[in-house]
Image (spheres, rainbow, N blue to C red):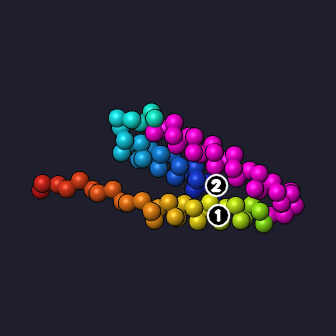
Amino acid sequence: FTTSCGLIFGNASALALGQVKPVAGAASALMGTFQALAGVLASPLVALGGSSNPLPMALTMLAAACLSALALASTGRAQEPRSNY
């Protein structure tokens, strides 16, 4: 899981920023803010279970995956530019 995150996050960020080139700096700042807020909100949820119980970590990961799937389903897919050929 960790290896795939390292391979995917950088490329996904670059692709997303490529879609908003005129405001790439603001978009990058917004993405960083949301990533930091996700960490701030997830850490206390995991800590509630203590250090010997893996269930809070698993539930937090499941909740994050469900929120990601919901975000993906609620956004439209970008249209590919049509070629004249």
- The range drawn in magenta is 27-54
Q: Position of residue 21 (x, y in %)?
A: 35, 38
Q: Position of residue 78 (x, y in %)?
A: 33, 56
What residue do we see at 47% from left, 50% from top? Answer: 12
Left or right of residue 57, residue 78 in this image: left
What residue do we see at 41% from left, 36% from top? Answer: 24
Q: Label 1, on which residue?
A: 63
Looking at the rendered structure, the kind of residue marked 2 is: Thr
Q: Secondary structure at mark 1?
A: helix
Residue 38 vs 57, above or below: the answer is above
Residue 49: in magenta span: yes
Left or right of residue 24, residue 85 in this image: left
Q: Label 2, on which residue?
A: 2
Q: Quadrant of residue 74?
A: bottom left
Q: Quadrant of the C terminus?
A: bottom left
The mark nearer the N terminus, 2 or 1, is: 2
